[in-house]
Image (spheres, grey):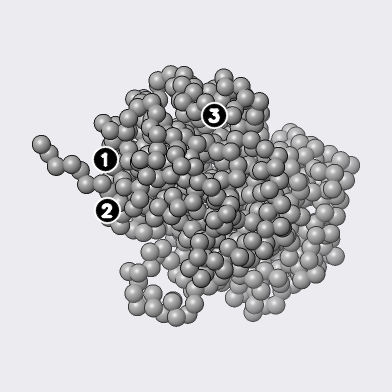
Amino acid sequence: MRDSELLNGLAHRLANRQNADGGWPASESGESATEPTAWALRALVAAGTAGSNGGATTRSREGAVGWLVERQSPEGSWPISDRVPERGASTSLAALALAATGDELLLQRSATAAEWLLEHPGKQVSWRTRLWLRWNPERNPLEMDLAVRGWPWMEGMWGWIEPTSTALLLFHRLRDRLDGSRVTAAIADGEAMLLDRTCPGGGWNHGLGRSHDEDLWPYPDTTAFALLALGPGRPEPAIREGLAALELMLRAPVSRLASALGILVADAFATDPGVLPARLRRQWAEEYPEPTTRAMAVSLLAAAGEPLARPSAAVPGEARAPRD
Amino acid sequence: MTDRRDFLRVAGGAAVAVGVAGCRGGESGGTPWQPEAWTKEDRSSTAVLAAGAYGADLPDLLSRGLAEFPGLRVSGRRILLKPNLVEVDAAGVVNTHPLVVHAAIEAFRRAGAAEVIVGEGPGHRRDTEYLLLETELGPVLRDTRTRFVDLNLDDVSRVSLLGRFGPLGSLYLPDTLLGADLLVSMPKLKTHHWAGVTLSLKNMFGVVPGSVYGWPKNALHMAGIGNSILDINATLSRLDRFAIVDGIVGMDGNGPIQGEPRPAGVIVMGEDHVAVDATCCRLMRIAPERVEYLSRASAFLGNLSEDRIDQRAESIRGRETDFRVIEDFRSLKVEAAPAG
């Protein structure tokens, strides 16, 4: 555990935000939704592992598990919320959260969700269009490999960086339980998508590195998710460039979410997080702005020193830590 | 007010038959909206206020601007200000300037608003806290004790769209938006590399929740940017609306995020968003009738023709600034008058 005081404070705050139905709203108040509930459960499992707050967090975890289990469809997916039945990226997060409990029955539910995701990657451009663009690359204004699919925010749409990253994290987590060739192909597609959609200066935004002859710039959160999904020990320059871009972005005082993700990336790549832990603690002492549930949960994971990345592929890479 | 909000909520279920009819009408070449649902006013009003710099007394200026619209009901009402918060903006030209948002908060409070809320659902950055802190809007909201609602994360209701220009049919929209008594679009005066211009109508893309549609809000682009602008604004026209455009320093060229600063020294206000956007175009020396979505909007949503817009406060003439556009939109420009 890195910071028990921050961890206990966030666990308490997170538990207090839980709705009576067992789920969490995305922000200060509101109706429960799958994604914030998944993040909260993932964080409270980490808090429990770290020995935080005993009974209260245990009851919160049980409520969250109940909320998620009740809403999983028979084929494995989750709706965005009770009011929004559409399915998509929240499925990978819910499955990751249930898997983190280590409970065998919940792991089986996670595996069913992963199977659903394997069947529902992002939309693909038709082979005729791809063939035409191969011969007319100047007519592809987005300058991307249209053969790779990744995973979408919402079923039936195009793949983007964050949902692809969380799907990859789930596939790695449950790899032993899934059909070998299918999951290998899915991981290859997801990783190819991430490696194709980098920004020219390094790092990732939501998935458009260039558009209409213009370079676009990376964001801290999407860069961190992509790095966590790709994991350490890989040879591709995109990893090294992504780490450098993230380090640069985190030099400026940023949001609590960005600081926390920076710590998780530093943990995963075995680099020095520098000022980020102290900065994160300082940021949580501020009352404004009201944090999202996601920021709270990811910060708790960072405070717990909970590994979020895929397992190392080889030797940890090198990156400098951000300095104030 | 309740009737209007209920209408939008109920529209999710009850208007299916109407929606199908509208869709058929669009496909067969008829009007892609329900003509009987719109009775466009004969005339609209816009106000152009001169504002040379952000250091001016903007709360006073906006209060005087609001006074140009005596029919606008503010007292005792819940006002939702919807600025354009897009990207980290070191030069202060991408987003609605925080001081203009601050001025609007003050002006509506002075006019007796029961509550002023600021809401936005950024389409590029998911981490809204990052944007609030980086753009200095966060400190303004904190210091004025103004509630901010991340429209990307708000509770949502499914609403049937009252336009059928695109294939969407319905959208989930934030409850804070649907519950507002007055929705105030607060865009930046900018050109746009895909839509030509981005003003009070295009600014409404930011009410579509990322928690449902993701980042970027690709579903709107896939449906056609112009189509989505029209369908969203047709639906939101059932709410009371107002617009305040930050044109003190605008952006031209490759907007909405990679263009150049273009000082224009104006704030534009009005109730009819089509008329407000048309006035903004004229101030940018862009012909509004050549902006495709604006021209289509003028058929049912508001007035575009100059002879149907009463100009209040300053005159457009003499206040125009030559905003550059990218090559694809060169035809939108009003040719400069010959010298001499």
User: Does residue A10 lie above or below A83 as drawn?
Assistant: above
Earlier-in-chain disc, 2 versus 3: 3
Q: In the image, is A99 to the left or to the right of A156?
A: right
Q: Identify which residue is drawn at 45% across, 53% down.
A: B299
Earlier-in-chain disc, 3 versus 1: 3
User: In the rendered structure, which amino acid carries the disc numbered 1?
Assistant: Asp
User: Does residue A169 lie above or below B291 as drawn?
Assistant: below
Which residue is the extreme one toward the left?
B340
Earlier-in-chain disc, 1 versus 2: 1
Q: Which mark is residue A52?
A: none
Q: CA distance from mark 3 to mark 1?
A: 33 Å
Does residue B177 show up?
yes
Question: Is label 1 on the same chain as label 2?
Answer: yes
Quadrant housing the N terminus of chain B: top right
Across and down, in percent, residue B35 comes to: 54, 56
Q: Label 1: which residue?
A: B322
Name the image quarter holding residue A137: bottom left
Mark closer to the observer (2, 3): 3
Q: Secondary structure at mark 2?
A: helix
Q: Identify which residue is drawn at 37% across, 44% down.
A: B305
Neighbour tally class for label 2: few under 14, some 14-19, many 20 plus, Cα within 10 Å: few
Quadrant housing the C terminus of chain B: top left
Mark closer to the observer (3, 1): 3
Q: Label 2: which residue?
A: B330
Q: Secondary structure at mark 1?
A: loop
Q: Identify which residue is drawn at 55% across, 38% down.
A: B241
User: In the rendered structure, which amino acid carries the disc numbered 2?
Assistant: Arg
